[in-house]
Amino acid sequence: MFHVNHEPGAGIHHTDPFAVPTDQRSPVRRLRGRLATPVTLWTAPGPAGLTVSSTLVAEGEPDRLLGLIDPESDLWAAIEVARRFAVAPLGPAHRQLADRFAGLFPSPGGLFATGDWTDTEYGPVPSDAGGWTGCRLDTAREYGWGLLVEATIEAVELVEESEPLLHYRGRYRKITDGGTAT
């Protein structure tokens, strides 16, 4: 049951009644929540897709992309077959899209049934995303409870300016002009 705040103008209390009390939560999980991360959408031919907030780009010869994904996801099954995938950075307008691909929002007709998509040889990407990169799978191995995916970047398409969507302490945030995340 939710706690109801009876103050004038107040609604249902903002806390989760099913949440584990702070003193009983994993300190590592709490630390991870304090690290702001970009929200990206990974897609592969099939199509399949997954919201991923653990993505890192490493410049070099060749340029590389690393990320942690769910080894039981439809995305991983599609990447294993295609050996390639696309990664698109999402912006504040993509909160619902991010939730849909994270399995937190309904997707009648399938994940790709709504929105405007651009087909690429690496997988479909949202047409209004901050660009995308096409990657070739190099290796993947179990890492913690996830799968560490290492790939070579083969293509990069960017838009002029794009504000990132961030994930911080279990919520989506955006950068404001004042330099603070909201």
Image (cartoon, rainbow, N blue to C red):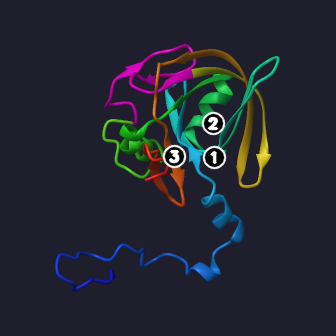
Q: Position of residue 121 (x, y in %)?
A: 55, 13
Disc 3 marks which residue? 166
Amino acid bearing label 1: Asp
* SS of the residue under disc 1: loop
Q: Position of residue 46 (x, y in %)?
A: 52, 25
Front-lying residue, 88 or 111: 88
Residue 29 sits above or below residue 59 on the image: below
Amino acid type shown at disc 2: Trp
- Residue annotated with mark 1: 70
Magenta extent: 111-132
Q: Secondary structure at mark 3?
A: strand
The residue shown at (21%, 84%) is 7
Q: For numbered disc 2, what is the local secondary structure?
A: helix
Residue under circle 2?
76
Q: Residues within 10 Å of mark 3 (few under 14, many from 20)?
A: many
The N terminus sits in image quarter: bottom left
Q: Is residue 11 left or right of residue 58?
A: left
Whether the residues at callouts 2 and 1 have beta carbons within 8 Å, the answer is: yes
| 164 or 46: nearer the viewer | 164
Q: CA distance from mark 3 to mark 2?
A: 23 Å
Q: Are marks 3 and 2 in contact (CB under 8 Å)?
A: no
* Mark toward the start of the polypeptide (1 vs 3): 1
